[in-house]
Amino acid sequence: MFYATEFVVTSSHTKELFKLSEKMKALPIQELIERRCDELSISHRELVIRTGVDNIAKGHRRLLQLLDGDFVSSRGFLEKLPAALEIDPALLEDAVNLSKQQISEEIEVDWRANFKPHAVAITANNGRPRQITIAAICNAGRHVYIDFPVNLARHDFKDYALNVIQKRAKEIANFFYSLEGFVINYTPDLAIKYDLQGVEIGQINKEVKVGKLSFTLR
């Protein structure tokens, strides 16, 4: 995976990480929490109060993030749940692990279903930008990610990518180190790497995925 290709400035980490939230079936962590709330006859607000957090509104946001499958933002809140739900911590851990597995599987299925051939410009230092923060704010990744026109024939992908890279060379140089070549992702399981003359360097049996940098504006 190249370090820097697509950059996103976002105020919502959860929705950027999991774009499938509306399509996904209920996560095991959600089912566990809802079931225990029913068994204990408590509301979400009462559950948050049971965790002992000082800020109830913030605690409720953390609970919603957890139910959506965001285990990063909610990790502090998560640690308080076994006592609040009156369950063995191992039971909660199992639900978290199963939820992560389900999210990963559903994202994989969605990614494969929506995959479209595309190219990625390769730059030195594994695609790392010269200045990460500036690159993120300017969404510099758009310069190295190359979409193909819908009706473009497969045998024209290479020439099209080369032409785009030549046109974008200045913009790429503003944010990244030297250009080294490009990769064309033909299918989810086949990517071919080329040098800047369009000579094939090698094949990879999976998509060369682009990196993504995001941060939260508070």
Image (cartoon, helix red, strand yellow):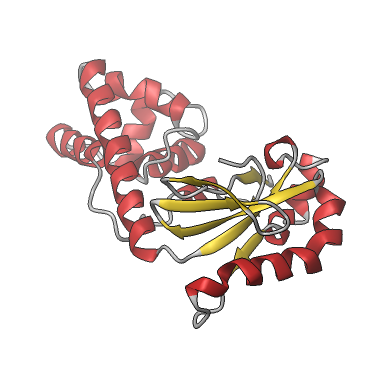
Q: Residue extending furthest left?
A: 39
* The one of 137 and 84 positioned closer to us in this rendering: 137
The answer to whether 213 is drawn above or below residue 197 in the figure is above
* The one of 59 and 24 positioned closer to us in this rendering: 24
Quadrant of the rendered image containing residue 84: top left
Quadrant of the rendered image containing residue 197: bottom right
x 82%, y 41%: residue: 131
- Quadrant where the C terminus sits is top right
Q: Residue extending furthest front?
A: 199
Q: Position of residue 196 (x, y in %)?
A: 73, 55
Quadrant of the rendered image containing residue 138: bottom right
x 72%, y 70%: residue: 163
Q: Position of residue 164 (x, y in %)?
A: 72, 69
Left or right of 61 in this view: 20: left
Left or right of 175 in this view: 88: left
- Quadrant where the N terminus sits is top right
Q: Position of residue 6 (x, y in %)?
A: 63, 53
Q: Residue extending furthest bottom?
A: 151
Left or right of 54 in this view: 130: right
The answer to whether 161 is drawn above or below residue 2 in the figure is below
Q: Position of residue 109 (x, y in %)?
A: 30, 54
x 46%, y 61%: residue: 186
Q: How many marks?
A: 0
* The one of 125 and 88 positioned closer to us in this rendering: 125
The answer to whether 2 is drawn above or below residue 74 in the figure is below
Left or right of 15 in this view: 36: left
